[in-house]
Amino acid sequence: MLAAGGAASIGAASGFALGRSSDATEAATAAPAPTPAPAAAQAEAAGIAADTIDLGTVIPVHGPHQAGVDTRPALLQTFVGLDLIDPSRANAEAVLRLLTDDVVRLTQGEPALGDMEPELAAVPAGLTITLGLGRPFFTRTGLTDRIPDPLVEIPAFSTDALQDRWGQTDLLLQVGADDAVTLTHAIRMLTKDLSTLTRVAWMQQGFRSAAPAVPGTGTTRNLMSQVDGTVNPTPGTDQFDEVVWVQDGEDWVAGGTVLVLRRIRMLLDTWDILDRETQETVIGRRIESGAPLGRTKENDPVPFDETDDKGLPLIAQDAHIRVAHAQTNRESILRRPYSYDQGMVDGTNDMGLLFAAYTASPADSFIPMQERVASSDAFNEWNTTIGSAAYFIPAGFAEGEFIAQGLVA
């Protein structure tokens, strides 16, 4: 996001703040989301040769961590919230076993058992399927004493306008791929196979641009055209391990992480009224390059202590990147922003950001950062958070095991 030096902010322009309630808040009944274009078509539209996206990519499914966190972000990602129909421990174990079998098959380009359209599973397209467990999963199944310490309650912040329909669920499926058919088929098989044990509470579809925001970088642009994802820990580094992975606990806990999912609606109609200079002052970065004000490159250090020729701070006191800046490495998070577009609702565009924050300790990172953002971020005027949920992503699993086996077996 737009944070500097390890900063981890929420949302747009490499950071999307939690927004203030507005008349533009999402209506109770929204139009269905358009189906995203296939990855190859997205790439071609962005001027990228379609053959640079390898739809034959297979992501390893076994290992110390579930896939979908430290892997390359997929072009398309859908989050599916599920609730147990009968929250017995036996049913909870059945869900974990059945889901694991589907995950192992589908992510490797193989059809799930009983798949009536096996051809649709033949293109893996970098498919990852990641399971998350919400606090209600533990409380409803009589496993309250097994809730991992990092999975704390995420409070409603002062600028939130949360809607129940995007709220907490027992389970989360995070499904990502570079092809829409592959993604859609995987979600259909997963929800169908779990339909006697769970019910779908919500489904949130997101997408990323196939073209990088700045050539040679891994950042993308959100629907405000802001460079999103500038400061992120790099997988495989000590910083990433400290920021993202839980280090201690049971075998299904250590190697896991906490996902905080926020649905952030962009108030584009009022944002578009601002001239570009004002927009950049609000954020603290140039829109075209993503560079901090007073600098030329996206990853240049942010000049928090410098002033302009009038003696004013280059980065305003309430600029998004200053407020959201991580105070310590422990306060950093891994940010994965995905845009969403629900079409027109009540005469205005309903679009925004699905902001996925992965952290070893939201109490030390996400929560204090968001408290600052809610209290003093100038950007709050142009976005509002309408959905919030948190899940523990269990550690990975070995061949012959199932996800979170140590929790229920």
Image (spheres, helix red, strand yellow):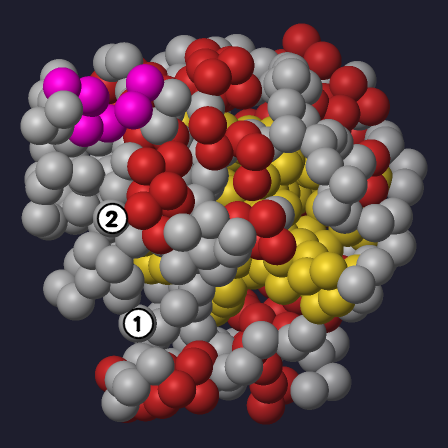
Label 1 Cα neighbours within 10 Å, binned few <14 / some 14-19 / many ≥20: many
Taking 232 as reference, is 74 above or below it? below
Q: Image check: 113 left or right of 47?
A: right
* Residue drawn at the location 71% of the way across and 13% of the way down: 144
Identity of the amino acid at label 2? Arg
Q: Is residue 94 above or below residue 307?
A: below
**Residues rendered magenta in the picture:** 311-317
Residue 364, position as x, y percentages in the image = 41, 12
Mark closest to the chain's N terminus, 1 or 2? 1
Q: Quadrant of residue 136?
A: top right
- Disc 2 target residue: 286
Q: Residue 263: percent from the left, percent from the top?
A: 62, 43
Labelled pair 1, 2 in contact (Cβ < 8 Å): no
Task: State which quarter of the image contains the C terminus.
Answer: top right
Nearer to me, 8 or 39: 8
Label 1 element class: loop
**Mark 1 lies on residue:** 211
Where's the N terminus, which quadrant?
Answer: top left
Residue in the image at 36% along x and 63% along y:
59
- Residue at image location 23% in from the left, 19% down from the top: 329
